[in-house]
């Protein structure tokens, strides 16, 4: 006979008197969420505004390009009427958590217990949302994708000479070519005139391993008195702040990036480089509330996180496929 696990309330006794304050919980969750998510580091939240509910909309005005004209003495000047384009950021996605707590008031009154709860809830929420966003940045969704010139075997809006790999033919990483790939991604962004500041590169652990075996690990290459891979921690390489994530989408074992069976066995992982101006992200712990458990003693705590994201400057985002 199968054994069924019973979920019991989290014991927080001794009880304490007081009132459940959802603002405290949501504030802690929101702060910890951004502290643990990779995507919170590689996107901008400039347009987060005052979103409160799923279905809210944030309107973003893209700055128009100003035309530069030749001038000769005595000519009549032409005046451009700038027309900004508008990007609509839909807060159309949501995730939630729900836990059974024996005494919510006691839980809130003990900071260590509350920190334990909010830390894990924020971590799990960050993992779920990171996986969603990083998957759709590969172009599988409709609201997040790099420019066509910033990906593929002929990347580069000017030269078309950088091979960033494809899902069918990924770059096979080695200690000798990994630096070349990093500099190729930087050059692709350079050809789009993307500023050097706030650039990021998200890689998987194996690519980090290859970087650790590359000449970059030797101090003399950069002229620094220490390796740029200090204590195994990757800092800045060719203007990129490097982040390592296990949540990058991978096509492997007969499945494509979206997890759909393909029958093949190719392994390809999408990695991303870009500027924080490329993708905007908005998230809000919209609601945290407690209610009495109708089926047992104790209380139920549940929280709702609403969010949305969109590529507002696709030319500032690049993607490579690696193996």
Image (cartoon, grey):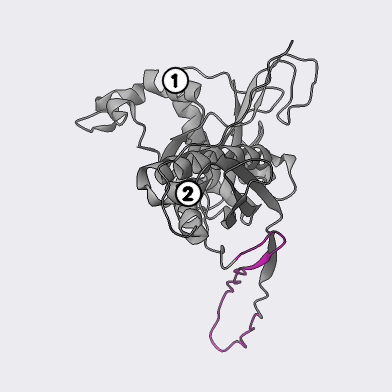
**Label 2 secondary element:** helix
Q: Where in the figure is residue 173, as x and y percent of width and height?
A: 53, 19
Q: Identify the magenta region.
A: 51-80
Residue that label 1 marks? 210
Nearer the observer, 304 or 150: 304
Looking at the image, which residue sits at the far left? 225
Q: Where in the figure is residue 244, as x and y percent of width and height?
A: 47, 32
Any part of residue 159 in sight: no
Any part of residue 293 in sight: yes
Left or right: 164 as drawn, with respect to 31: right
Q: CA distance from mark 1 to mark 2?
A: 28 Å
How many other residues sit within 10 Å of disc 1, few (<14), some (14-19) or many (≥20)? some
Residue that label 2 marks? 34
Tell me where residue 241 sits by quadrant.
Answer: top left
Placement of 223 over or under 266, stated as above or below:
below
Residue 82 badge = none
Placement of 144 over or under 4, stated as above or below:
below
Q: Magenta segment: does it hold 90?
A: no
Q: Residue at x 68, y 15 (%)?
A: 3
**Label 1 secondary element:** helix
């Amino acid at each position: 006979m199968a054994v069924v696990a019973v979920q019991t309330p989290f014991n927080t006794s001794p009880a304490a008197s007081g009132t459940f304050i959802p603002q405290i919980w949501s504030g802690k969750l929101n702060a910890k969420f951004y502290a643990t998510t990779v995507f919170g580091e590689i996107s901008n939240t400039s347009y987060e505004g005052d979103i409160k509910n799923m279905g809210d909309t944030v309107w973003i005005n893209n700055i128009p390009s100003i035309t530069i004209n030749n001038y000769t003495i005595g000519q009549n000047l032409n005046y451009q009427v700038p027309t900004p384009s508008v990007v609509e950021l839909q807060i159309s996605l949501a995730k939630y958590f729900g836990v059974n707590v024996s005494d919510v008031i006691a839980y809130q009154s003990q900071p260590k217990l509350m920190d334990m709860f909010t830390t894990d809830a924020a971590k799990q929420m960050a993992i779920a949302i990171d996986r969603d966003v990083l998957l759709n940045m590969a172009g599988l969704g409709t609201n997040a994708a790099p420019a066509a010139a910033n990906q593929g075997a002929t990347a580069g809006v000017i030269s078309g000479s950088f091979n960033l790999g494809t899902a069918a033919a990924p770059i096979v990483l080695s200690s000798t070519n990994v630096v070349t790939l990093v500099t190729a991604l930087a050059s692709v962004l350079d050809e789009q005139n993307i500023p050097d500041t706030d650039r990021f590169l998200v890689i998987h652990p194996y690519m980090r391993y290859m970087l650790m075996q590359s000449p970059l690990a030797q101090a003399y290459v950069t002229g620094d008195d220490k390796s740029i891979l200090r204590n195994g921690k990757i800092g800045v390489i060719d203007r990129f702040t490097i982040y390592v994530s296990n949540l990058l989408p991978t096509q492997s074992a007969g499945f494509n990036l979206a997890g759909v069976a393909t029958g093949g066995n190719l392994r390809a992982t999408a990695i991303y480089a870009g500027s924080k101006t490329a993708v905007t992200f908005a998230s809000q712990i919209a609601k945290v509330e407690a209610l009495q458990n109708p089926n047992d003693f104790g209380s139920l705590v549940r929280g709702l996180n609403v969010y949305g994201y969109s590529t507002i400057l696709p030319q500032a985002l690049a993607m490579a496929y690696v193996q």
